[in-house]
Amino acid sequence: MIYLLLFAGLFMGWSLGTNDAANAFGTAVATRVVKYRTAVIIIAIFVLAGAFIGGAGNIDKVAELSTSNMVLASTEEVFGAIENGTVDTLRLKSAIKAAIIFACAGLTVFVMSYLKFPVSANQSITGAIIGWGLCYADYTDPAVLSVNLPQIGKFASTWVINPVGAGIISFILVFFANKFITNHLTSLGSYDRIIKIGYLVAGAFASYSIGTNSSANVTALYYDAAYAETGVAANLLTDARITATIGGIAIAIGVLTFSKRVMMTVGSSIADITQMDGFLVIIAMALTVVIMGKWMGIPVSTSQAVVGAVMGAGLTKGIKAVRFGVMKNIAIAWVSSPTVAGVLAYAIAFLTRGYFG
């Protein structure tokens, strides 16, 4: 029965899939180069491939933050449970806490997706983890602060660095493409076929990057980070690749079932862009996610990257080409999602002190 608690993480993955599908093919669908049905099938396949091949790389960072915020059991707690014969109890509590965090974050992302805001699932999960930690973790302990503050600082800094970086890359790509390439391509009789192939390749690459980047956020809280040291399973999953792949499956299901609303918001509401611009936006987003992931060593928001990239593409045509009213609402949602998820997690943590201690 304990494995039923995995459904909270799978709900988180489903919610993430409904939101992040827009980041790979939103501009392609909005500019009518690729059909929606074709787009979601490609996304699902390559998200799953990315999760299986490279998704395990981000799991440890999420697990580290979760351990320092008393969501996952530390190595010391596991050894203590072994001595006291309470490993099964510890395992159950860890799974319940993970389910609570994912439920808070997943509900937040789902509501934002329904309202057509492309929010960050990464930030929502981080907000929920920190919300739980503010109730249980000792933030006056230097050992706790030494882990939490740098990680929180990294996640918070991505609110600015990620979309701005994507916007700069997108602006440069679109500017030079319009200056030296676009006119030559549009004069070719096979232009439509070329641009469609380009979209399909770029979307597949972007979908793969979503799988490697985001699958950890879906199931990392069920991963037993202490297993290698203790040899005892104090959480539900002990293999990083399997953990990431399960997350990828959940994301793929979300892509296939409920992704159209946000996809159209990202693709057409932020700025006026051409078919070529949309192709370069996808490339800029995927490059940003890969670069940021390698540079900062944490999962970053593909939603923030693609919104920044669309804005950068729009700015090549002048400031009037960008709908700053839509951008303002999206920015508010970026800040609101981790805040709401954190408040929900804190409230539940406070109400369950009698059980978790």
Image (cartoon, rainbow, N blue to C red):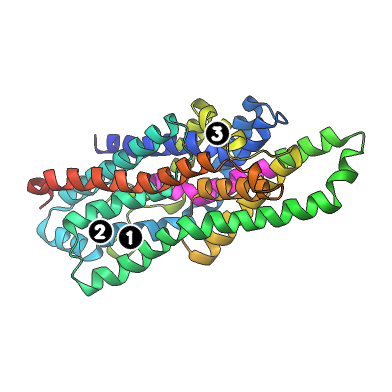
Cα–Cα gap, marks 2 and 1:
6 Å
- Residue 87 position in % (x across, y down): 18, 53
Q: Quadrant of residue 322?
A: top right
The residue wearing badge 3 is 265
Circle 1: residue type = Leu
Magenta residues, start to end: 202-219
Query: Residue visible at 49% across and 50% down?
Result: 301
Do residues under tags 1 and 3 come within 8 Å of each other at their CB atoms?
A: no
Query: Residue visible at 83% across and 34% down?
Result: 193
Q: Nearer the viewer, residue 327 or 198?
A: 327
The residue wearing badge 2 is 69
Give residue 65's mark. Answer: 1
Q: Tell me if residue 210 is in the magenta stretch.
A: yes
Mark toward the viewer: 2 or 3: 3
Q: Quadrant of residue 24?
A: top right
**Residue 251 in view in this figure:** yes
Query: Residue visible at 54% across and 43% down?
Result: 324
- Residue 318 position in % (x across, y down): 69, 48
Query: Residue visible at 67% across and 38% down?
Result: 272
Q: Secondary structure at mark 3?
A: helix
Q: Secondary structure at mark 2?
A: loop
- Residue 323 position in % (x across, y down): 58, 40
Circle 3: residue type = Thr
Q: Nearer the viewer, residue 101 or 249?
A: 101
| Number of other residues with Cα within 10 Å of mark 1, as a class: few under 14, some 14 to 19, many 20 or more | many
Circle 2: residue type = Asn
Q: Earlier in the sequence, mark 2 or mark 3?
A: 2
Do residues under tags 2 and 1 come within 8 Å of each other at their CB atoms?
A: yes
- Residue 266 position in % (x across, y down): 57, 37
